[in-house]
Amino acid sequence: MIVMGIDLSGPANHKDTAMAVFQTTGDELNLLDRVVHVDDEKILSMILSYTKYEIIIGIDAPLSYQDGGGDRPQDKSLRDFIKSYGLLGSSIMPPTLTKMVYLILRGISLTRRIMQLNDDKKIKIVEVHPGAAIGTRIGPSYLYHALHYKKEIHSRYVILDWFQSVGLKNLPIDIADNTHQMDACAAALAAWHWGDSAKTPVWHWDGVTSAHPFEICC
């Protein structure tokens, strides 16, 4: 099985978009490839190159919005959940917030194009929250690093070591130089625990509807 994590940014912000590709080997995810400064065509070409496998894709972006604006039910549920771990509820923003709108547009467009590649139903997509995937697993002793890794490189090194301890292997140290690569790896971790029948996500929203066609997990 191939597991991909995508840290998505808005359609004009390729430089802050990163993608990590892993393959499951027993109880490990082994890094096969990683790319940064990624446009939609590159994402699609990477997916196409692995279509002989089952593919699980975790995307860090809202993949739907609430009609009328504000939170989706799943946003409120996840926000309340991560606050119970000492994480910041403000990291879960309503999809229709002005600063989020372009990200939603890219996420919806990209997932539509990915599903057009899915004739044999080998591709599965889940919306993920990388910061929550880290913070709800790393434990109280390392909560500081989950809260500060986007600003402090030392915290990214701590989390990089932790990634290795939970089964993400072959991670080069320079992944810690870029927060978007870190988030792509965390997106893959969450997607792996969602898509592998031997794993269980820490939090999971499976209330799929026509308005909200993708499950969410961390």
Image (cartoon, helix red, strand yellow):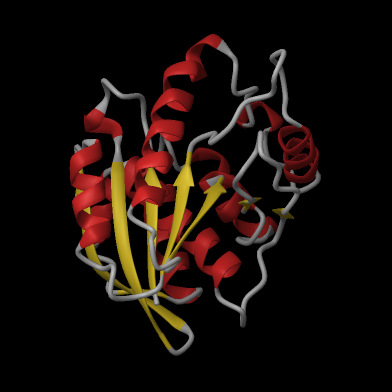
Instruction: Indicate left or right for 67 with 108 as reference.
Output: right
Q: In which quarter of the image is the N terminus?
A: bottom left
Above or below — where is 215 with respect to 79? Answer: below
Q: In this view of the protein, can residue 145 be seen by the observer?
A: no
Kindly identify the residue that appears in the image at 49 percent across and 63 percent down.
Answer: 189
Kindly identify the residue that appears in the image at 67 percent across and 71 percent down.
Answer: 200
Q: Which residue lies furthest to the front in this view?
A: 119
Place of residue 24 in the rendered image (x, y in percent of width and height, measured from the top left): 40, 80
Instruction: Indicate left or right for 27 with 11 as reference.
Output: right
Above or below — where is 180 with respect to 163? Answer: above
User: Is 159 in front, or is 214?
Assistant: 214
Kindly identify the residue that appears in the image at 25 percent across and 47 percent down.
Answer: 43
User: Is 49 in front, or is 79?
Assistant: 49
Instruction: Indicate left or right for 132 with 161 as reference.
Output: right
Place of residue 163 in the rendered image (x, y in percent of width and height, measured from the top left): 44, 66
Kindly identify the residue that appears in the image at 72 percent across and 24 percent down.
Answer: 71
Above or below — where is 43 with respect to 3? Answer: above
User: Is 120 in front, or is 60?
Assistant: 120
Above or below — where is 126 with respect to 120? Answer: above
Q: In this view of the protein, can residue 50 be seen by the observer?
A: yes
Q: Which residue lies furthest to the top in this view?
A: 98
Instruction: Indicate left or right for 172 with 96 as reference.
Output: left
Place of residue 138 in the rendered image (x, y in percent of width and height, measured from the top left): 60, 61
Number of marks in picture: 0
Place of residue 168 in the rendered image (x, y in percent of width and height, measured from the top left): 40, 72
Which of the 4 image quarters holds residue 123? bottom left
